């Protein structure tokens, strides 16, 4: 059984970078890569067939619908994918991979399309919160006779817990903007207010690594004008990315909603102190009693100031939240991507016998 990952049709983010390799600058590309790694020899569905070092790209017309499971990351068009593959009478094998919150879409047409897709094709979600939203969409937008057909499963994404990381605090504290985009739900303006206030009181270096399409956004350019900040493209390699994370003192998350929070978990795994909003999505990432959950910008500023002026105290506090052990060990144990990988493969086997 062949596995084909379909993504990119409903987004402007490229599948292949200018260097001829698989693009890595979007969350969708990251999720697709996770699936491709699980199934060596799997292919990517694109607008035209081509080959890159990481995978082959094929069109829908080149897929054998009888012997291929299509994992569709563009859930809005799952019904359209079915129609294309069904033209010869085959019964296509399609799985919705809901990797972002359905609430990221706002139009009734989108919700109706998702309700139909969830009803006809099994859906695997990147976390419990995403699965809850999927169930809500089915309940509100699918007619009862179809809603009863919906099959939904989930697992939290997790990170590569096996990667060795040695944290180092630099003489000038490094504060990370913990996202690769400046989209509205990340609230980069609130991030700017918090770090700018702290930068007036103590020397810090704010670092933002962004996808190319966001480097020229107004929020990025405003941040880049500050003498205490560095705004630049994403790191070219995973090793460079983790090395930079290991030298990060703290980060401030300001997002209103997250499907999971991969960037935050990776930063905390590398030893950075996470200043997180007291929101449901953030509470799922950390243990009960986590000391750096804020309810206002003033609280976030105070927490960040403490983290950059006394990183050892901040580290001790987060260790205490896990009973005096190492907080980074807790992150490894509770956010291991092996759990997600196993759950995804198990469901694909259950649903398709792949």
Image (cartoon, rainbow, N blue to C red):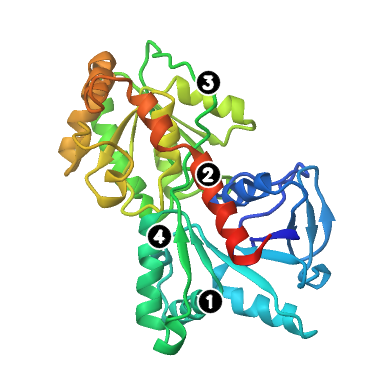
Q: Is residue 273 above or below residue 58?
A: above
Residue 177 visible somewhere in the drawing: no
Q: Which of disc 2 and disc 1 is earlier in sequence?
A: 1
**Image quadrant occupied by the N terminus:** bottom right
Q: Position of residue 70 (x, y in %)?
A: 67, 65
Res 164 label: 3
**Image coordinates for residue 201, horizontal then vertical, percent:** 22, 22
Say if 206 sits above or below 258 in the image: above
Label 1 SS: helix
Question: Which comes sooner in the sequence, label 4 or label 3?
Answer: 4
Q: Which of marks 4 and 2 is in front?
A: 4
Say if 62 sits above or below 181 in the image. below
Residue 198 is left or right of residue 66, and the answer is left
**Residue annotated with mark 4:** 130
Mark 3 or mark 2: whose residue is earlier in sequence = 3
3D distance between C-alphas at marks 4 and 3: 30 Å
Mark 4 and mark 1 residues within 8 Å of each other at the beta carbon: no
Given residues 344 and 288, the one toward you in this image is 344
- Residue at disc 3, secondary structure: loop
């Amino acid at each position: 059984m062949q596995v084909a990952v379909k993504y990119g049709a409903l987004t402007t983010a490229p599948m292949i970078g200018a260097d001829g390799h698989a693009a890595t600058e979007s969350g969708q590309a990251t999720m697709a890569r996770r699936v491709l790694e699980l199934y060596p020899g799997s292919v990517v569905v694109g607008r035209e067939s081509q080959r890159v070092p990481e995978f082959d790209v094929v069109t829908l017309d080149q897929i054998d619908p009888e012997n291929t499971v299509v994992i569709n990351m563009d859930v809005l068009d799952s019904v359209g994918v079915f129609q294309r593959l069904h033209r010869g009478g085959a019964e296509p094998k399609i799985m919705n991979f809901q990797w972002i919150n359905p609430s990221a879409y706002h139009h009734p047409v989108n919700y109706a399309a998702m309700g139909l897709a969830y009803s006809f094709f099994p859906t695997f979600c990147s976390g419990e919160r995403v699965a809850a939203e999927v169930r809500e969409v089915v309940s509100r937008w699918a007619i009862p006779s179809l809603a009863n057909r919906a099959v939904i499963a989930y697992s939290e994404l997790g990170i590569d817990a096996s990667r060795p990381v040695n944290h180092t605090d630099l003489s000038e504290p490094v504060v990370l903007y913990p996202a690769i985009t400046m989209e509205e739900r990340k609230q980069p303006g609130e991030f700017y207010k918090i770090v700018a206030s702290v930068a007036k009181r103590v020397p810090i270096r704010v670092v933002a690594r962004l996808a190319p399409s966001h480097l020229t956004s107004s929020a990025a350019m405003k941040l880049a004008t500050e003498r205490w900040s560095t705004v630049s493209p994403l790191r070219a390699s995973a090793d460079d990315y983790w090395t930079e994370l290991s030298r990060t003192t703290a980060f401030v998350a300001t997002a209103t909603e997250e499907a999971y929070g991969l960037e935050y978990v990776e930063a905390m795994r590398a030893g950075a102190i996470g200043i997180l909003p007291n929101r449901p999505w953030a509470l799922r990432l950390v243990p009960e009693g986590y000391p750096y959950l804020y309810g206002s910008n003033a609280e976030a500023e105070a927490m960040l100031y403490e983290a950059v002026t006394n990183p050892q105290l901040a580290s001790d506090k987060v260790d205490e939240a896990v009973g005096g052990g190492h907080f980074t060990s807790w992150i490894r144990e509770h956010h291991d991507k092996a759990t997600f990988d196993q759950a995804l493969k198990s469901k694909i086997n259950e649903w398709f016998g792949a």
